[in-house]
Image (cartoon, helix red, strand yellow):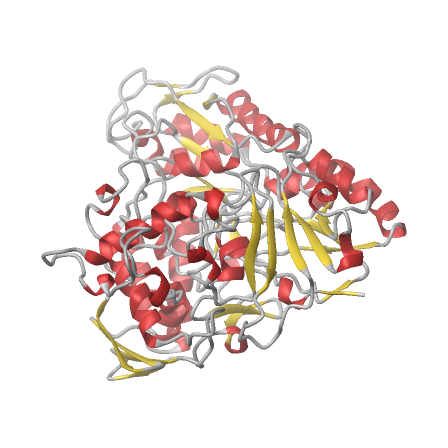
Amino acid sequence: MRKISRVAVWRTAGLAALAALTVAGIGSGALTASAASSSGSASKIVTWAEAPNSGPNYISPVSGSTYFTTSNLSQFSEFIYRPLYWFGDSGKPVLNDSLSLAAPPTYSNNNKTVTINLKHWVWSNGAPITARDVTFWMNVLKAAVSPGAANVGNASAPGPSWGAYVPGLFPDNVTSYTATGTYTVVMQLNASYNPTWFTYNELSQITPMPQASWDKTSATSPVGNYDQTVPGTATAGALAVAQYINVESQDTSTYATNPMWQVVSGPFKVAAYNISGYVKLVPNTRYSGPVKPDVKAFEEIPFTSTTSEFNELKAGDLTIGYLPQEDYSQLKELKHSGFTSNYWDIYSTNYMPYDFSNAQAGPIFKQLYVRQAMQSLVNQKQIIKDYYVGGTGKVNNGPVPNTPNNPFLTKLEANQNGVYPYDPAKAVALLKDHGWTVNKGGTSVCSRAGTGATDCGAGITQGEKLQFSFLYASVGNVFTDEMTSLVSGWKQQAGIDAVVKTPEPFGDVVGNAYTPGYSWQLDNWGAGWIYAPDYLPTGEELWETGATSNTGNYDNAEANALIKATTTASTAKAEITAIDKYENYLADQLPVLWMPNAPQALTVYNTKLTGFVPQGIFDVLYPENYRLS
């Protein structure tokens, strides 16, 4: 997702968005800033506080859904391996040409042919970044999403895959890709696509990889052209290469020592790493980008609680941290101590996925009136007031981010009174009107089974309880209080019985959400989805049937058709119209339980640090811009 996270995932998920925003102390820090660097900002070392229990644990840019999080991508591997196209410019969700490895693509042949010209950047070993490095990525990516990829090589590994994969879309919709010159790649597509969509959501997935260093099938094999033997042929060399990269990525102990990870394209390379999440990055002196790093090192500091993070912040041992909700009153004191603050706004939508494929709860969740009732019991305005830093945030009604302002947000979705405003009486009426005996404070039961307009609905039996399991991340007391209040409201006001499973660490909750057959029925890792690498909020990665990041297995033919229309719109106006129809439909249909959107955090940083704002709206950091006076 990215979850957060990029889960976050993402790129869910990845995504520890609210973790940095709402959690409270749960223990001592795993590694304090002072332990990581005794010299601090005086030696041009910038230290940045990770959200609790959310350090990076995967380094390759080809990551499956389990690792498809902002912690691994936006806040780690993209410092080291730059995507072909970079998005985000001065706080706006647009293509950033100056930070891209290639010039903007050109489209021809009725938008069926795409030509990419690289800018002659170099790897850290001095070798040029060429079209071969792009086709290497494509070959490995096609292998990673091929059937049976997870069963190749190391059986204990989760297997190479791709968290942004949607069957039928990238890379499936590319019929051929050819290096027509040292720095030129030409792609042929299987249909005419909207060029903006294809650039923002398809080409955005490409990260050139150093073919001359990584094209191997094992740590001891020589470098070759194994990737050019693709799935379906006699020897699936590309699949073996994908598995090799995946296995090496899971060996976190070698991130700072494995020569494989020392050939980089980004502004930094890894100098130190430990399993607690501590990362030390040092400048890549051959970085080709327009802004060269000025700091001596950039250190990511892990913590197990916001209490320990705040103590380090007050002690002056962090250059960049965040202010936990429970310490908001101390902002003035921090500003007197040489810090300033900035809200970190993220281009995201916050939600909890239902598991529509679950044998027990799936038939209940598939009833729109049940989802309407549950959404009507989410008091978003009160949640923002009680649980979000400084009471900041906006009511969230659908899939398109409502901050920062963007041309795709409809009046319906932007409505701060809610598409389904808080209304316990309506929730009860919806259930009663569809055959449920509502037991406030207990558990409601189906008293009129059947598929008629006033019955409980298909798959729900007579006497069945309105009950399901609920898993959420153990990211601290404030977040737990928010979830406890929500669960209590469901039960007390409408007899909707959410049985809370033992909360688990953020990374485990994200991983479980993407694990087929795991026994969750409603899931909340606390952040929803940051739009990256699907920078245009058209939703195919999240809601289209069969998409990898469609964690709840939402399946709706009308939604699929509306999403497809966003990918083929021929003009900018038609594109906005298509996205409007899609987002209004999902705001009405509730494929997930929408939760309020809020800033990632109230970031607090040393006044001696410049080049820090505006913060990256895709949850990415720009340490190459940082300057310490």
Location of residue 78 in the rendering, given as x and y in whole percent from the top left corner: 50, 60
- Residue most toward the right? 336
Q: Quadrant of residue 554?
A: top left
| In-image side of 611 versus 171 (left or right) | right
- Residue most toward the left? 234
For the C terminus, the image quarter is: bottom right
Residue at coordinates 65% horizontally, 52% vertically from top-left? 299
Q: Closest to the observer: 134 or 409?
A: 134
Location of residue 443 in the rendering, given as x and y in whole percent from the top left corner: 44, 17
Location of residue 146 in the rendering, given as x and y in whole percent from the top left corner: 21, 52
| In-image side of 344 versus 455 (left or right) | right
Q: Closest to the observer: 231 or 310?
A: 231
Residue at coordinates 61% horizontally, 63% vertically from top-left? 622
Q: Quadrant of residue 512?
A: top left
Q: Quadrant of residue 50?
A: top right
| In-image side of 388 versus 524 (left or right) | right
Location of residue 85 in the rendering, given as x and y in whole percent from the top left corner: 45, 71
Residue at coordinates 71% horizontally, 44% vertically from top-left? 33
Q: Is residue 590 visible?
A: no
| In-image side of 166 versus 232 (left or right) | right
Q: Closest to the observer: 366 or 286?
A: 286
Q: Is residue 582 visible?
A: yes
